DNA sequence: CTAGTGTTTGGGCAACTGCCCAAGTTAATC
DNA sequence: GATTAACTTGGGCAGTTGCCCAAACACTAG
């Protein structure tokens, strides 16, 4: 009966990951220490190195888990959108909760920066980002948006940039930004390069 | 003759600031220590607290000095641009040297994140950012770009976002991004409602 | 019961942290 | 020369850092 030690161990591991995520946001990637994480998780400091090979691997695990979760929670919303505009609106709407100084925004940025200094993190983040952009680009292409790959890249970058700037200036809201970003999705009706020639989208 | 001690002191102070700037980029804001900065600057550790009240004030001073310099070096270029498109092109061109993983890009992002946790830094960065956006918005307004303030905010945010993403994906180049971001500058000939239908742009 | 497996504890090590300070240097002023 | 002010040194303090490990614990299988 009761819980096995293995189960309790798994739970402790989760608590460590969650605590690490919180602390990355609060103190910054390099400001997190093993003892801090252990205290937040309510366990003794020695346990950190039982469940994780190093502090670095704990932080990497925690950050990427959180990022994948955040993206996974947005993706189904995007799937249900019909037009690229709707995709963007939903993306920005889901961003409305992210004030820039919130946990998710800061975690993303912290992880991007960590990626600058850690090849392993960089590879993992690049993968996640590519997975996010791929379906977005496909959708843009289907609806005749010019240069869909570059546009998807800019949309992703702009959303992250807005997230960043909101921390410094709360007047940068989703409402004020949305109509501007929508212009990015302009169809091109003449030839411009080799892009798919966008009919329209009534459906 | 020779140099006075005051002059040498000023030079040491500068070396400390420069060393701090480099180390923020290399190790992250919270990863910089007094002894590290002193070693990089080629002085003894005790000197840090002679020239600066605290490590925090050294980092703040260093980061904001570097940011103001970076922006100041771009602004004259923008002044000479005639159309908003030209402004954007020049902005992106100057960004070409910033590969995302370069010193300037990382320093900007590190400082944004530090601003998240330090009110003093936040205030200073917000000021610098506002100073950058103000003339940009005015220029956009003069050329009939819709919602100039919001557009300037998005342009600034997007540029920073692109800078961030380039660190993870070098294929996000200024060339691929420029034509997409240009769409943001679409003129609006009617009153603004929803999607701009992009008349044309003969200028 | 014993053995075995997985988890947890608490203490320890050597290195590092921000900050301080008495004593020293140097050049300008009297 | 003596005094002054600015700058510099090197050592020290108390606290923190990542990581390690012997011992204790909990629970299962034989």
Image: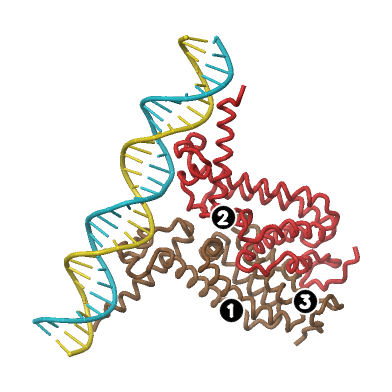
Chain colours: A brown, B red, C cyan, D yellow
In this view of the protein, which residue sits in the foreground, B145 or B164? Answer: B164
Q: Quadrant of the N terminus of chain B?
A: top right
Q: Are marks 1 and 2 on the same chain?
A: no
- Mark 2: secondary structure: helix
The residue identified by callout 2 is B110
Which of labels 1 and 2 is toward the front? Answer: 2
Q: Chain of mark 2?
A: B
The residue identified by callout 3 is A146
Where is residue A158 shown, x and y percent of the image? 67, 66
Q: Are marks 1 and 3 on the same chain?
A: yes
The residue identified by callout 1 is A75
In this view of the protein, which residue sits in the foreground, B87 or B21? Answer: B21
In this view of the protein, which residue sits in the foreground, A182 or A33? Answer: A33
Where is residue C10 shown, x and y percent of the image? 22, 59
Q: Quadrant of the C terminus of chain B?
A: bottom right
**Total of numbered circles in the picture?**
3
Where is residue D27 shown, x and y percent of the image? 22, 81
As drawn, is B166 to the left or to the right of C3? right
Q: Quadrant of residue B196?
A: bottom right
Q: Chain of mark 3?
A: A
Mark 1–mark 2 Cα distance, whole angstroms, equals 28 Å
- Mark 1: secondary structure: helix
Please report contact status of discs 2 and 3: CB closer than 8 Å, yes or no: no
Circle 1 Cα neighbour tier, 10 Å, few/some/many (<14 / 14–19 / ≥20): some
Q: What's the residue at 66%, 46% (across, down)?
A: B68
Q: What's the residue at 63%, 58% (across, down)?
A: A165
In this view of the protein, which residue sits in the foreground, A125 or A159? Answer: A125
Q: Chain of mark 1?
A: A
Please report whichever mark, 1 or 3, sits nearer to the chain's N-terminal start: 1
Where is residue A29 shown, x and y percent of the image? 48, 59
């Amino acid at each position: 009966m009761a819980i096995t030690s293995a189960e309790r161990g798994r739970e402790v591991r989760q608590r460590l990951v969650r605590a690490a995520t919180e602390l990355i946001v609060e103190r910054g990637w390099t400001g997190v220490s093993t003892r801090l994480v252990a205290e937040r998780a309510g366990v003794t400091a020695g346990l950190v190195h039982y469940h994780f090979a190093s502090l670095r691997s704990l932080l990497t695990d925690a950050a990427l888990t959180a990022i994948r979760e955040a993206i996974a929670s947005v993706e189904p919303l995007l799937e249900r959108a019909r037009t690229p505009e709707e995709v963007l609106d939903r993306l920005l709407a889901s961003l409305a909760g992210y004030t820039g100084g919130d946990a998710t925004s800061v975690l993303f940025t912290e992880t991007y920066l960590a990626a600058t200094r850690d090849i392993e993190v960089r590879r993992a983040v690049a993968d996640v980002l590519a997975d996010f952009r791929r379906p977005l680009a496909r959708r843009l292409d289907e609806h005749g948006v010019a240069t869909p790959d570059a546009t998807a890249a800019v949309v992703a970058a702009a959303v992250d940039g807005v997230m960043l700037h909101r921390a410094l200036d709360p007047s940068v809201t989703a409402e004020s930004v949305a109509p501007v970003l929508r212009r990015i999705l302009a169809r091109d009706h003449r030839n411009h390069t080799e892009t798919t020639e966008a009919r329209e989208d009534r459906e």
